Image: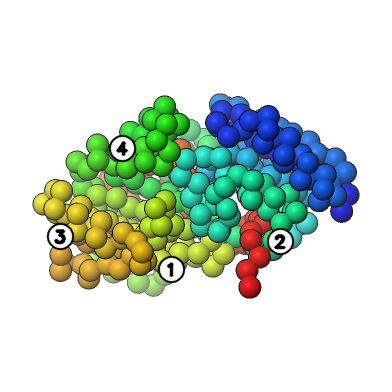
Amino acid sequence: MGGLACVVINPSKRGATPRLRAALAAELRAAGWARVDWAATTPDQHGARQAARAVEAGAELVIAAGGDGTARAVADGVARASGPRAGVELGIVPLGTANLAARGLGIPLRRWPALRLAAGTAAHRVALIDLLRVSTDALEAAGAPPEPCLVVTGIGFDARLVAATRAGLKRHAGWGAYAIAAVRSLGSPRLPMRIAVDGGAREEARERAREEARARCLLIANSGRLPAGIRLLPDARMDDGALDVAALDVRRGLVGWASLARQVLPPAPARYTPPGRGLADVRLARGREAVVDLGEPAPLEIDGEVLAPARWARVHVEPGAVAVRVPRTG
């Protein structure tokens, strides 16, 4: 194979051990890579700049070894520096807590099979997957460009849950830390919002119809797979050129949350009761762009990173933005 491969690794992750580094280097050599460069993320540089520099240096494979934040940053760097058809591939070695990107792509969560897949010594194929681009009033006010999103942008309950999840607890309890934080966040208020998906000739009518809509949580997603086998958005795929929107609301406190849980818990994919017929309402939509007007600042997170509260957000799809190594099926 020859050429240059680069590993962008998050050294703060417990799995980023010397043993893992040595194993990944050995697999890359076995796959025929002549040279392997390493770059570490920092609190200020989460992987996008490191990935872009690797592509500019001639890397044909860039591996993100870390959590969802590292994966989204590296994917962004690769997409911006090369584009999906420039011969640069992305590998993912999941070292995080939720690892939602890996779950959505079918990448093994066990480290050794994952690193063999990323290096190319295990059977794999290359999938062109989408990135979401997220703009908010807070980002625009700060003069910042749109943020990349690989898995999900969450507003309301979801963002409060992420903010409430303690790093120390994640190290000890894994993804169960999110379940603990979820219990603490059940009192999240309803948010008034107007949502428009794809606009078009009916945008004004759609906005009028939803002008008084309220939800505890709004998800704008590229994938709907969660830990514990939950498929919150069964139709969401990372390679379909579309985003999936879910506005979730519950009534009567814990009873409403229990009703929602019954609709999403495995083994079957989520099946939602029609809105207005139960204590939990889930309204779904699909499209290429979603715009939400919240009226007042609400908490927002992207792939597990909490951003400044936003009054409005615009999310659009960049189809087939990144070429990712995934397991070969069939």
Instruction: Name the residue: 30% across, 68% down.
Output: 271
Q: Which mark is residue 235?
A: 1
How many residues crowd mark 2 within 10 Å: few (<14), some (14–19), many (20+)?
A: few
Residue at the spot 36% in from the left edge and 37% down from the top edge: 177
Give the number of the disc on residue 279: 3
Residue 314: percent from the left, percent from the top? Answer: 43, 52
Q: Can residue 125 be seen in the rendering of this structure?
A: yes
Q: Secondary structure at mark 1?
A: loop
Q: Are marks 4 and 1 in contact (CB under 8 Å)?
A: no
Residue at horizontal 15 percent and vertical 60 percent from the top: 279
Separation of disc 1 and disc 3 at Cα? Answer: 23 Å
Q: Earlier in the sequence, mark 1 or mark 2?
A: 2
Q: Earlier in the sequence, mark 1 or mark 3?
A: 1
Give the structural element (helix, strand or loop) at label 2: loop
- The first of marks 3 and 2 along the sequence is 2
Instruction: Locate residue 21, reporting x and y percent.
Output: 70, 35
